[in-house]
Amino acid sequence: AASERRAARHRASTGRGKMLRVLAGRQPLVARAVRAQAPMGARALSTKAQEGSFSLVSADQTMAAQRVFHKTSLACLAITPVAFLLHPTPLAMPVDVALSVLFPLHAHIGLNWIITDYAPG
């Protein structure tokens, strides 16, 4: 019993015991998110994501922009191999035009997120 008390005093004096007590009192992250009714799977933004219409100026602040970003990602994934297959034919022109719109739009939204989340200020 005395050795247990000594070990407990040692843990408390080193800070490890305090950390363990703090961690033991916390709920798991998932439980806290569910309790707070936070949307699971939502992107963690440094700016608050809002429902609303898509805006090119604030492309990182709306849920509509997130949906456009995901749809352009899937469209680029599907259309890029088609562009390579249709290259020497006249059918390649509409596919190239679609890609020339999709890639910059996708990059603009993604880089907006990176700048907003990681650039200071």
Image (cartoon, rainbow, N blue to C red):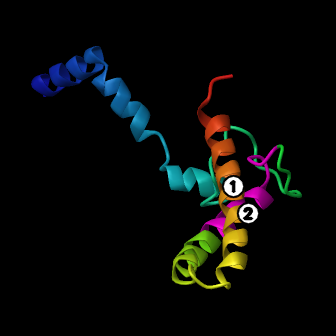
Q: Is residue 119 visible?
A: yes
- Circle 2: is it few (<14), some (14-19), or many (20+) Cα within 10 Å? few
State if disc 1 and disc 2 touch (CB < 8 Å).
yes
Q: Which mark is residue 101?
A: 2
Instruction: Report x, y in % for residue 104.
Output: 69, 55
Specify start and end residues of the magenta stretch as a single range. 58-73
Return the residue nearer the eye: 94 or 24.
94
Q: Is residue 14 above or below residue 44?
A: above
Q: Is residue 67 left or right of residue 26?
A: right
Badge 2 marks a residue whose secondary structure is helix
Q: Residue furthest right?
A: 53
Q: Amino acid at mark 1?
A: Pro
Q: Is residue 37 visible?
A: no
Rendered image quadrant of residue 64: bottom right
At 61% from the left edge and 72% from the top edge, which residue is drawn? Answer: 74
Return the residue nearer the eye: 5 or 39.
39
Instruction: Tell me the CA gap for discs 2 and 1.
Output: 6 Å
Q: Is residue 64 left or right of residue 39?
A: right
Q: Is residue 44 above or below residue 80?
A: above
Q: Is residue 12 left or right of residue 106?
A: left
Is 121 one of the magenta-colored residues? no
Return the residue nearer the eye: 61 or 86.
86
Q: Which mark is residue 104?
A: 1
Badge 1 marks a residue whose secondary structure is helix
Q: Is residue 26 left or right of residue 20?
A: right
Instruction: Report x, y in % for residue 101.
Output: 73, 63
Q: Amino acid at mark 2?
A: Val
